[in-house]
């Protein structure tokens, strides 16, 4: 394969766990391989939990000294990620290969192996997983998570308005998911009194699928569907990482966009969400405590191996005259501000009316800023643009 082709391909993100003879050498070779991004390694599964859950992995390589499949360790990995797992062993027996046939393990690699063979096996495993879980009806919704480590920065205002703008002005099938599980107020900001919440969905018996999900969402006048936070804070803990992971995967099959509102914490369900997040909107404002916490959050995201290119800094209340400039935010964070949302009296007015400002005051600067963010995050596909350009020509003929 030419280098050109190699650079065109996206590198597969792999995390390595466990140990066996020759595994360290293999890891070193993989770390230097152009098609692989070895995002991290841990000698045992528990130490790698955060990266496994939040690391956007394409595959996990798990090494074992045991002669049979390490069922407990594999189950522990499954608690954190759905990425395909390839087992690596130095003293494998035919028994392990036999066991692998009946298991969820994507492959068994007995060392020593040529690194190229290992890379091929990893690629094959990721490819097979994608084919086995095709996005239903051709959809593969994009997950946009709105986060800030500081309370009150405007997460819920941003998430509700972004979702409303996507549904109403971009004609996208949109789900707003309130993951501020204890004190979520996305529904109230939209003037909705929900009958069902995410809690009812996760405690309902039976497998979750797209039809079941549809039965628990509430439609807003903008066209978005909302799955609100539980009504009682104590119900939050039933929304486990595993349930949420499944929920997001099902939601992807029936929505173009899933906008997730969050609380200012990296709890289990948040890690499960990060693992599936395509765009992470990190909200900042022009104040020192928020910046301090954002820097810490960026460090945590790095520890979790969250891909930096998926982070977009949003500067809320960007026009506030508070003795701090946008470039100071950028140099403190070491990242450019991607979207600016001005402060506007129309926002609290709309919040108190239970209406998203993008609908309540379409012409306000804040509404324009959020609509442009929506457009930017979900650009009209080239094919659709082309079709639009061609339409007048057809009409003439
Ligand atoms: N751009 C803005 N202009 C004016 N007011 C704003 C703006 N953004 C947010 N606000 C106000 O700030 C308040 C807090 O915003 P919001 O509830 O979205 O923050 P949050 O980050 O979700 O807070 P929490 O961490 O408590 O969930 C809102 O009631 C809203 O009126
Ligand atoms: Mg909020």
Image: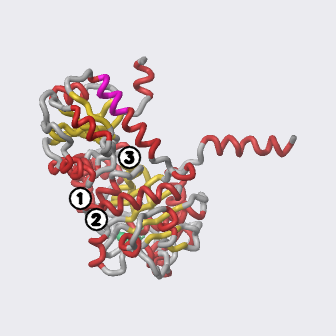
Q: Earlier in the sequence, mark 2 or mark 3?
A: 2
Residue pictured at 32% horizontal, 26% vertical: 34
The residue located at (43%, 55%) in the rendering is 143
Q: Nearer the viewer, residue 69 or 226?
A: 69
**Secondary structure mainly formed by the magenta segment:** helix
Where residue 186 appears, x then y in whole percent? 42, 72
Which of the two marks, 3 or 1, is nearer to us in this view?
A: 3
The C terminus lies in which quarter of the figure? top right
Q: Are marks 1 and 2 in contact (CB under 8 Å)?
A: yes
- Callout 3: few (<14), some (14-19), or many (20+) C-alpha neighbours within 10 Å? few
Report if the beta carbon of the residue with label 2 is closer than 8 angstroms to ligand 1.
Answer: yes
Q: Which residue is mark 2?
A: 264
User: Dot 2: within a 10 Å radius of its alpha carbon, few (fewer than 14), some, or many (20 or more) residues?
Assistant: some
> Which residues are drawn in magenta?
116-123
- Rendered view: 135 above or below 19: below
The tag on residue 293 is 1
The answer to if 121 sits in the magenta stretch is: yes
Tell me if I can see residue 50 in this picture.
no
Q: Residue at x 33, y 33 (%)?
A: 122
- The residue sitting at 37% across, 32% down in the picture is 123
Taking depth in this image into account, of 113 and 48 the one nearest to the observer is 113
Label 3 within 8 A of ligand 1 by Cβ: no
For residue 310, the mark is 3
Considering every residue shown, the one lying at the far top of the view is 2
* Element marked by disc 3: helix
* SS for callout 1: helix
Residue 207 colored in magenta in the image: no
């Amino acid at each position: 394969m030419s280098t050109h082709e190699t650079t065109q391909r996206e590198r597969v993100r792999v995390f390595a766990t466990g140990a066996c003879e020759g595994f360290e050498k293999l890891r070193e070779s993989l770390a230097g391989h152009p098609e692989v991004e070895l995002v991290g390694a841990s000698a045992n599964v528990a130490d790698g939990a955060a990266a496994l859950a939040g690391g956007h992995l394409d595959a996990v390589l798990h090494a074992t000294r045991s002669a049979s499949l390490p069922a407990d360790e594999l189950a522990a990995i499954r608690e954190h990620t759905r990425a395909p797992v390839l087992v690596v062993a130095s003293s494998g027996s035919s028994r392990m290969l036999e066991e692998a046939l009946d298991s969820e393990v994507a492959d068994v690699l007995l060392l020593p192996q040529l690194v190229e063979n290992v890379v091929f096996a990893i690629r094959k495993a990721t490819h097979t997983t994608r084919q086995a879980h095709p996005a239903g009806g051709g959809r593969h919704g994009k997950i946009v998570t709105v986060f800030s480590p500081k309370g009150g920065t405007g997460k819920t205002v941003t998430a509700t308005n972004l979702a409303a703008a996507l549904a109403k002005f971009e004609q996208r099938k949109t789900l707003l998911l309130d993951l501020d599980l204890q004190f979520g107020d996305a529904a109230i900001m939209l003037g909705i009194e929900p009958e069902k919440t995410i809690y009812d969905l996760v405690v309902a018996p039976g497998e979750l699928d797209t039809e079941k999900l549809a039965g628990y969402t509430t439609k807003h006048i903008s066209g978005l569907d909302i799955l609100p936070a539980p009504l009682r804070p104590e119900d939050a803990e039933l929304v486990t990482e595993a349930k949420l992971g499944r929920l997001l995967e099902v939601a992807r099959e029936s929505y173009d966009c899933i906008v997730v509102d969050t609380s200012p914490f990296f709890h289990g369900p948040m890690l499960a969400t990060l693992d599936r997040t395509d765009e992470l909107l990190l909200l900042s404002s022009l104040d020192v405590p928020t910046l301090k916490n954002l820097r810490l959050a960026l460090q945590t995201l790095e520890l979790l191996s969250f891909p930096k290119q998926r982070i977009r800094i949003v500067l809320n209340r960007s026009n506030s005259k508070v003795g701090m400039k946008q470039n100071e935010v950028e140099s403190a964070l070491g990242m450019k501000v991607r979207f600016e949302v001005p402060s506007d009296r129309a926002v609290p007015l709309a919040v108190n009316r239970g209406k998203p400002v993008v609908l309540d005051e379409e012409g306000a600067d804040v509404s324009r800023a959020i609509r442009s963010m929506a457009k930017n995050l979900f650009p009209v596909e080239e094919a659709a643009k082309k079709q639009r350009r061609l339409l007048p020509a057809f009409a003439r003929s």
